[in-house]
Every structure is written in structure tokens, then in C-alpha cells.
Amino acid sequence: MVIALVAFLVLRAAVVPQSFGEYGHFRGAAIAEIAARPIAHAGHDACEACHTDVVDQKKLGKHVVVPCEACHGALAKHADDPASVTPPKLDTAVVCARCHEANSAKPKTFPQVATADHSGGIACDTCHQPHKPKIEQTKTETKTEEHNLEAGGKK
Amino acid sequence: MDLTRRRLLMLLPAAAVAWKYVQAGTPEMSPNYKFTEHWWGMLIDIPKCIGCGSCVRACADENDVPDGYFRTWIERYHVADWKIEKPEVESPNGGKQGFPPNLDATGKNFFVPKLCNHCADSPCTQVCPVGATFVTPDGVVLVDKSYCLGCRYCVQACPYGCRFINPKTDTAEKCSLCYHRITKGLTTACCEVCPTGARQLADLKNPKDPIHEFLRNHTVQVLKPHMATGAKVFYNGMDGSVR
């Protein structure tokens, strides 16, 4: 009987992880293990530390609220080692349409276009500057104005 | 103290025990992070969601979510006039590549991002037979994948359908509220990339968190409140047809 009890206790000590029950009915060390995983998105603070020129440009337009990695993707590796890991060039015809393609389920106040009518699928950065997307209209640039009115863009 | 052979032999077992602790190590959390000081949740502002799928893509990148499985996803609701009980819901590939254009503007149309609700009284943790899933002291429901058997009880138990079995590891997986990010002082990947601010991480224990003012001034609901799960993902402007 005593031997069986001792054998049980020894087995139990060997099988049950040390931190089990530390905070509840689970392995306490798991919390720290999950917390220790590496990150993939650097966060816009990390981007803004170096790319101050882009931050200044974004401040002039509505895209100031759009975080960098929403378009550019997960770039923690680039933030860790900017020299060797460079972000891929984006295809604006795809990236811009993800948000701005017209859809009746989108909020009515959100700027939307049907890209087929608006641009015929050409890259948006042909006309728009992605960090400051509004096209400035001046009297001398009548062509831009015409294009914008045809495209249904707001003044 | 002279280190004689006798002393060395006496020290060795102690060193062996200590070495076990050294090897196990304390994986690095942010040094200032105390999980008794936080209680995490999320705020989702439905009128701001544009269904771009940035959150779904970011989540997959951040957490190596296999294709076809989702820790967070977006649903598009279409509630036809006179049919509030039977909304049409679709989520093509979880909304990862956004949604195909839908120019039919009749009825109500809107997007609802979904994720684990990090319930305070979570049904999924209660059914786990081995203690592989749990609520952390800061209110995040996590899965210990080295301890999970893959028995699928939790997948059935979650009333929100937030869990799946990862085909690579054959263990249960779900949104971890980017626990590896929030413990380092960052926000979750989905909140980080949301272009309209429709998703916001909220620390309900922090009196300075803007969530408190928001909850005071808005009509906010959680999913399936009748299940009394203590869900902590708050939806602003949610239509009554959302399930």
C-alpha cells in the first residue's frame, strides 16, 4: 500500500508540470511562453521613428489615420534590420481598391469608387499620391480637373 | 571555503536541481508588465468597418494562421426589408481579400468583424479535460498548445465559433488577443492595421483607457448576451439581426 502510494506520488511529480496550478487549473509557465513569441508587425511608432518625411506628408491628407502596416504589410523584420530586409513595392491598383472599391455595405461617408469606371484598373498612383491622396486642383491644371470631374471625384 | 571533493559531490545534486530551473527559464515578458493590472477586451465600432480585410491578413501574418482557417474574420450582413430575423451573411475566405462589390443598396448592409470574445466565464475553458486552455489573470483566453490533446471539446463549446483545430499541429487554436504583443506594450495586429479605427484594444482595468468614456456615451452590446459568457468584445452600433 505504502509502496503504491509512493509510486503514485513519484509518478505524479514526474508527470505533472512544475508550474501546473500556479494560477489555476493550467500550466502557469504557458502564459510566459505565449507572451515570449516574436512579433511580426512592428507598429506605426517604429515606422515613424525613421520615416519622418512620410509622416509629415501623411499629416497633410486624410490618410494620416491609416497605419503604415495596413498597406505595407507586416514589417517587424524590416524594423529590426532595415538594411537587409526591404519592403516589397505595392501595386496600388490592388491595395487602394481593398478599401476604396464601392460596396453598399461600406459606411456611406467613406470615399468609394467603382474602379472599373473610375480608372479602368490602372494603378492609382498614376494620379494620386498614396500618402496624400487628394489631388490638388489649380486653375492651370485643367486636365487634372477634367479627369477628376469625369472620374466623379469630389472637389 | 575550500572546494573539496566531498563538498563538490554534495553540491552537485543541488546544482542539478537548480540547472533544471535555469533550463526551463522564465521566457521574457515585458519587464514592467504585471498581469494583475490589466483586464483586456476589445471595442468594435461597426459603423466604421469598411470590410477591407486588413485585420484578417494581419492576423494571419502575425500568428501563422493556416489558409482557410481564421482567428478573426469579417462577415457581411444583408438584411432585406421585412426580413430582420433572416439576415443573409457571407464571409468569402473570411473577408481576407475584402468583399466582391455589392452595389445592391436595398435593405441594410454592413460588416461585422468577429474574433474570440475573451469571455470572463468562457464555456471553452470549462470543458477542457486537461487544463490546456485557460483564462489568464489579465482576462485573455489562451491555449497551451504543448498541453492540448486536440480532443475538440472546446471547438464545440464555443458559442461564437472562434476555435479550430490547426491541421499542422492538430491542437486547438484561437485568437490570443496577440498576447505576445499586448504584454510588450503594443496593440494587437488587427487593431494595429485597422485603417479606420473600427477595432480598438481596450484595457478595462486602466481608468485612463478611452474605452470607459466610449462605453458611457454609446449604446454598446456584446454578442449572444443571453449565453452569459461575460464576453469582453464590445460592439458599437450593432444591428439586432447580428448573431
Image (cartoon, rainbow, N blue to C red):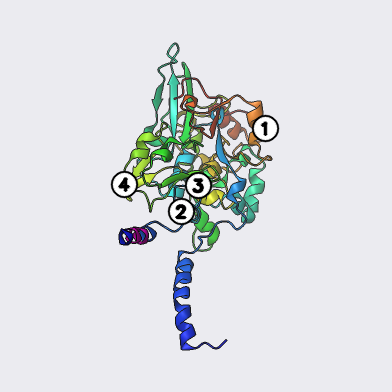
- Residue at figure coordinates x 40%, y 17% from the top left: B86
Residue B187: x %, y % from top left:
57, 46
**Is there a contact, CB below 8 Å, between mark 4 and mark 2?**
no
Q: Residues within 10 Å of mark 1 (few under 14, many from 20)?
A: few
Task: Say which of marks 4 and 2 sits in front.
Answer: 2
Left or right of B152, for residue B207: right
Q: Quadrant of the C terminus of chain A?
A: top right
Q: Amino acid at mark 4?
A: Pro
Q: Residues within 10 Å of mark 3 (few under 14, many from 20)?
A: many
Is disc 3 in the same subunit as disc 1? yes
Q: Amino acid at mark 2?
A: Ala
Q: Which residue is mark 1?
A: B213
> Residue B167 shows which numbered tag?
4
| Alpha carbon distance from label 2 to label 1 | 34 Å
Q: Which residue is mark 3?
A: B178
**Any magenta on residue A15?**
no
Q: Which residue is mark 2?
A: A30
**Is there a contact, CB below 8 Å, between mark 4 and mark 3?**
no
Residues shaded magenta: A5-11
Callout 3: chain: B
Residue A6: x %, y % from top left:
35, 61
Q: Earlier in the sequence, mark 4 or mark 3?
A: 4
Q: Residues within 10 Å of mark 2 (few under 14, many from 20)?
A: many
Q: Please state which of residues B237 and B31 is positioned toward the viewer in this rendering.
A: B31
| Alpha carbon distance from label 4 to label 3 | 21 Å
Viewer can see residue A102:
no
| Alpha carbon distance from label 3 to label 1 | 24 Å
Q: Amino acid at mark 3?
A: Cys
Q: Secondary structure at mark 3?
A: loop
Q: Secondary structure at mark 1?
A: helix
